[in-house]
Image: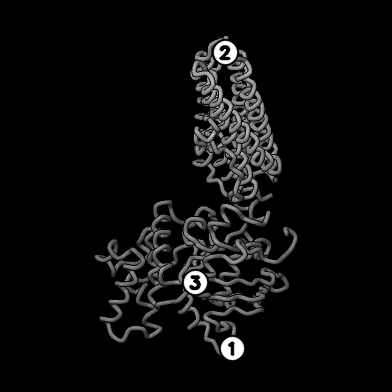
């Protein structure tokens, strides 16, 4: 890609990209720490995560302001315009990911330390998957790697499948032993949060595709989250 | 794709060309000034009742091509045009065609407003009079008033139609030139950077006017302002070094151009 005749324009676009990379790194860190906090029942770490979320929110605002200023000053066209629009959208996905991670951290307080550990295993695995997806999609953005973005987009299936099985598993626990309903409900929301984070990663992947090709990704993505239509009686109880 | 000299169509069949009748059809046009070739093998369809913008860096041939559309190049010594340019399927370079009558059908508005050193009324009345479009004073008055109204100038000048046209502001002068161009009831209006000498408010008024005029005319505009091309046109053609590099729906050209040279030019990367 040639440079702009106006060098300052290149610097402004590069600045936007750097800010987004910073925000992505922070979202990734928050997600990783929130999974560790809830799985390891680390209340102090959880509180830290809750406080740090403000930084992500501030970065989103900063990115939006930068983007608006570039549009006003440079009247960007074509690829430049897409890059700016996509930055705004990705920042908004990252902000949501930050909120969801914060919500996972908050639940650390609500889950008693002596809960049955095996219930946590699925959630930890799901968290690792989502973290991998987020990392890959941020790399894909940094490198404008459309193939990598598409891989993330397709892999979301795995998170959905895992979510379905965790959903069923937690329901089973709750039916077997109503005393676990409190913990299991929190874990269910935690799992749902991670599933949503996976969806935000696929949003980002779609935006990378749009950035590269100038048209939206139209393929039908395999949707595997069927929990909204799963009847509780359908579990054989 | 980048090295080839065939024109990229974006999309393959631009919507504006598919949905409007073709007013001007140019095929394999070459233009020479003496030994120097200014336009190379250019073919383009220009839709009726729409605005087509010709963009490109200085010296790319866009103004030269605009001038082939009403044979203004005839007035330049050594200029030579080959290929065909059809207006409603009729070759305008045919020997039987009177260039003066052609220019009544294909009007032109220039970069710098150039009113005649006559009254506002006479500036507009001149064309209809020499082409015999009005048979009495009443009919001529009507043409002058309606042309000034269509050019969005009437309310500002109705009390001083006898004052010299050169006494108007730049933006008003340009609208007077547009009124003069539409007074002879043309089919096509060519505009060569019509706003480059105007301030932003006057520019906005001309752009608004172009938008209204496109309901009745085929408009072809050469502009150095990419934002202007994006704002006013439905078809955009990008010229570079005498070649028509890419043409297509304006919405596509400015958001997702296919040729690298187009992309570089519209994003301000031309090296």
Residue holding disc 3? B20
Disc 1 element: loop
Marks 3 and 2 close (CB-CB < 8 Å): no
Residue holding disc 2? A115
Image quarter for residue B123?
Answer: bottom left
User: At 65% across and 77% down in the image, what residue appears?
Assistant: B81
Q: Is residue A156 visible?
A: yes
| Residue in the foreground of this view, choosing between B58 and B19 | B19
User: At 64% across and 21% down in the image, what residue appears?
Assistant: A121
Q: Chain of mark 1?
A: B
| Callouts 3 and 1 on one subunit | yes
- Direction right: furthest residue: B3
Q: Chain of mark 3?
A: B
User: For the residues marked 2 and 1, what is the alpha-carbon distance in whole angstroms?
Assistant: 97 Å
Q: Is residue A190 left or right of residue A25?
A: left
In x, y percent, where is residue A174? 52, 22
| Quarter of the image that includes the N terminus of chain A | top right
| Count of numbered marks | 3
Crowding at label 2, few (<14), some or many (≥20) Cα neighbours within 10 Å?
few
User: For the residues marked 3 and 1, what is the alpha-carbon distance in whole angstroms?
Assistant: 29 Å
User: At 66% across and 25% down in the image, what residue appears?
Assistant: A125
Circle number at residue B95 = 1
| Residue in the foreground of this view, choosing between A213 and B137 | A213
User: For the residues marked 3 and 2, what is the alpha-carbon distance in whole angstroms?
Assistant: 71 Å
Marks 3 and 1 close (CB-CB < 8 Å): no
């Amino acid at each position: 890609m040639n440079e702009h005749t106006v060098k300052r324009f290149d610097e402004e676009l590069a600045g936007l990209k750097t800010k987004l990379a910073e925000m992505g790194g922070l979202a990734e860190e928050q997600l990783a720490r929130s999974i560790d906090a809830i799985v390891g029942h680390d209340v102090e770490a959880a509180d830290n995560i809750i406080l740090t979320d403000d930084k992500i929110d501030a970065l989103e605002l900063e990115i939006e302001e930068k983007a608006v200023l570039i549009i006003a000053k440079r009247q960007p066209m074509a690829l430049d315009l897409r890059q700016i629009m996509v930055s705004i959208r990705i920042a908004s996905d990252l902000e949501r990911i930050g909120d969801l991670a914060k919500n996972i951290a908050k639940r650390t307080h609500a889950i008693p330390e002596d809960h049955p550990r095996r219930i946590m295993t699925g959630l930890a695995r799901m968290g690792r998957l989502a973290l991998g997806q987020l990392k890959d999609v941020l790399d894909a953005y940094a490198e404008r790697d459309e193939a990598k973005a598409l891989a993330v987009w397709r892999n979301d299936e795995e998170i959905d499948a895992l979510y379905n099985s965790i959903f069923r598993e937690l329901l089973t626990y709750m039916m077997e032993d109503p005393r676990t309903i409190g913990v299991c409900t929190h874990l269910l929301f935690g799992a749902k949060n991670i599933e949503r984070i996976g969806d935000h990663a696929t949003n980002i992947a779609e935006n990378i595709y749009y950035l590269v090709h100038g048209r939206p990704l139209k393929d039908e993505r395999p949707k595997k989250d069927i929990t909204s239509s799963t009847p509780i009686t359908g579990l054989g109880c | 794709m980048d090295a080839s000299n065939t024109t990229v169509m974006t999309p393959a069949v631009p919507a504006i060309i598919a949905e409007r009748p073709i007013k001007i059809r140019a095929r394999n046009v070459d233009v020479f000034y003496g030994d120097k070739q200014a336009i190379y093998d250019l073919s383009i369809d220009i839709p009726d009742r729409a605005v087509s913008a010709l963009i490109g860096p200085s010296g790319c041939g866009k103004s030269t091509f605009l001038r082939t559309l009403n044979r203004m190049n005839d007035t330049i010594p050594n200029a030579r045009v080959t290929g065909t340019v059809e207006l409603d399927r009729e070759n305008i370079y045919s020997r039987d065609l009177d260039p003066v009558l052609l220019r009544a059908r294909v009007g032109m508005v220039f970069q710098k407003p150039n009113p005649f050193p006559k009254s506002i009324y006479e500036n507009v009345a001149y064309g209809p009079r020499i082409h015999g479009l009005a048979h009495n004073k009443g009919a001529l008055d009507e043409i002058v008033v309606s042309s000034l109204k269509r050019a969005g100038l009437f309310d500002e000048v109705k009390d001083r139609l006898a004052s010299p046209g050169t006494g108007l502001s730049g933006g008003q002068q340009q609208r007077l030139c547009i009124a003069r161009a539409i007074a002879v009831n043309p089919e096509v209006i060519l505009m060569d950077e019509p706003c480059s000498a105007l301030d932003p408010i006057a520019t906005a008024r001309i752009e608004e006017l172009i938008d209204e005029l496109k309901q009745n005319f085929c408009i072809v505009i050469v502009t150095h302002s990419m934002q202007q091309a994006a704002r006013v046109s439905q078809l955009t053609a990008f010229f570079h070094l005498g070649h028509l590099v890419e043409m297509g729906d304006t919405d596509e050209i400015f958001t997702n151009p296919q040729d690298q040279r187009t992309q570089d030019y519209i994003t301000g990367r031309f090296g």
